[in-house]
Amino acid sequence: MVRKQGARANARPAPCARCGKTVPAGEGIVSFGRDGATVKHPRPQWIGSLISGSWAGGCPTDQVAVADPMAELLGELLRNSQLHRVLWVVASGRNRYDDLILFCDANAVEQAITSALIVEPLDDDLLPPYHLTDAGRNLITRWRREVQARLDTEGFRAVWEAVTAG
Ligand SMILES: [Zn+2]
């Protein structure tokens, strides 16, 4: 029998090799070692939007051990702040090529274009200038709502300023 590489789900309920609690059928990850097959809860993952997503998976005992979700969210927001800044700058009407070069990181502008969050003009003198797609508008609208609501929470002020300063 050929054993496939990669993750495989457990066919039957089994105790988790990490936490000892029962993993329901189909919800665990099977791995094969010298002592045979072991089943574990999948590693927790942040799923969904980086702003409104949530943790999924993990051992029941992880739910507290997982790094602070708020810290994780802040990390994601900080990592993406240059991209969010592009959307913010365009949304605020500074949407000519010269504006973007002046206010934004060039790689983030490129990323916003390739991610279909903004559309570039056919030519810099043509209208419309750089503008948000629906996806870009939704993202920056949600970003503003979520971050603005947390400005009193440590760290979010820095995220806000990284995106909106200037
Ligand atoms: Zn477990």
Image (cartoon, rainbow, N blue to C red):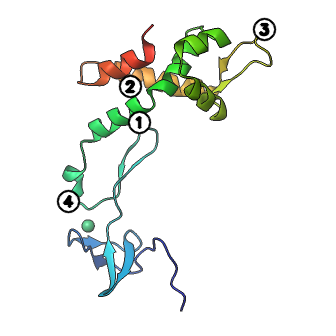
Going from the N terminus, do you reach mark 4 or mark 1 first?
A: 1
* Three-letter amino acid code of the residue under disc 3: Asp
In this view, the mark in front (1 or 3): 3
* Three-letter amino acid code of the residue under disc 1: Ser
User: With respect to residue 34, does 97 lie above or below?
Assistant: above
Residue 137 placement, left or right of 13: right
* Labelled disc at residue 146: 2
Q: Is mark 4 within 8 Å of ligand 1?
A: yes
Q: Residues within 10 Å of mark 2 (few under 14, many from 20)?
A: some
Where in the image, quadrant-wise, is ligand 1 located? bottom left
Q: Is mark 3 within 8 Å of ligand 1?
A: no
In this view, the mark in front (3 or 2): 3
Q: Residues within 10 Å of mark 4 (few under 14, many from 20)?
A: few
Quick check: marks 2 and 1 in contact, CB under 8 Å?
yes
Residue visible at 42% across and 33% down in the picture? 79
* Three-letter amino acid code of the residue under disc 2: Glu
* Labelled disc at residue 125: 3
On the image, numbered disc 1 is attached to which residue? 52
On the image, numbered disc 4 is attached to which residue? 61
